[in-house]
Amino acid sequence: MKNACRILLTLLALLGAGLMPVRAELPFRLPEGLDPGREGGVLAGRVQDSNGKALYGASVKIDGSERTRTDHRGGFRIAGLPAGEHGLTVYLSGYRTAKGTVSLSPGQSRDILISLSSISGDSSSESAPIRRTRLTIQARPFRSDGARYTVRRIEVTEQGGPGRTWKNTWYRTYDSYVELPCDDAEFGRYYRVTVTWYNWRSRNEVTSSWEPRVWRDSQKESYSRP
């Protein structure tokens, strides 16, 4: 027993002095299917006009395929891209298309800034002319399970830019349809349309939203049910 204690004390002394090497092996394995050299990259960025204003709804294509569109802040994010060089195309009606290439390393995240110049005017000018028209939103009543829902409210909000809003509320209307004119709508811009229907007997309310894009003069969008 005394000999065993002496041996244990000797081993502890050697370890404390760093004279006895210690080796530990952990049973660590990568998850199945994960290759550390081939992780997908992430490409993020912001699209703006030549004056620095965010552009909403711009199409972002990678290697010829549309992958996403910019949000109201002009931002976009594409994940899962393989390493290497990719063709990048950014397109928005009323602006010159931007084309180029972007390179990604395995698992790399990149942020880029893309500026599109307006087709309607010189990009160096302080205020390029903007083409505007009237956007008319038309909504009709509908029936569901025998109940009639009439149009109660229409609200239209401009996406990006000043973010203007047009809205109106109708009370106990039984007309075949109602209309909301939106003057000075901008060509190439998206507008969020929210229509609310109401059943006066059950007092139930139904709301739906759409995001049409203005692309023609005196454009009219019609909605007949959620």
Image (cartoon, helix red, strand yellow):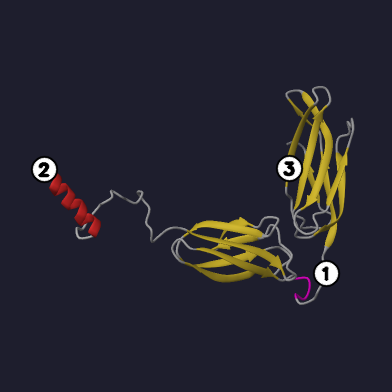
Question: Closer to the camera: disc 2 or disc 3?
Answer: 2
Amino acid on which the number 1 mark rests in the picture: Pro
Name the kind of residue labelled 2 in the image: Lys
- Magenta extent: 119-123
Which quadrant of the rendered structure holds the C terminus?
top right
Judging from the image, what secondary structure is the residue with disc 1 in? Answer: loop
Classed neighbour count for the residue bearing mark 2: other residues with Cα under 10 Å, few (<14), some (14–19), many (≥20): few
User: Label 2's element?
Assistant: helix
Q: Inspect the image, locate mark 3, and give the three-letter code of the amino acid beneath it.
A: Ser
Q: Which residue is mark 2?
A: 2
| In this rendering, position of residue 31 left or right of residue 129 | left
Please report the residue visible at 13 percent of the width from the left and 48 percent of the height from the top.
7
What's the magenta bit mostly, secondary-structure-wise? loop
Label 1 to label 2, Cα distance in Å? 98 Å
Residue 196 appears at what percent x and percent y? 79, 36
Q: Residue at x 78, y 24 (%)?
A: 147
What element does badge 3 sit on? strand
- Looking at the image, tell me whether mark 3 or mark 1 is earlier in sequence order: 1
Which residue occupies 19% across, 58% down? 20
Image location of residue 77, percent across then percent down: 58, 57
Image coordinates of residue 129 in percent, x first then y, are: 83, 69
Question: Quarter of the image holding residue 209?
Answer: top right
Residues under numbered marks 2 and 3 in contact, where contact means CB atoms less than 8 Å apart: no
User: Which residue is label 1 attached to?
Assistant: 129
The residue furthest front is 2
Residue at 82% over, 46% down:
137
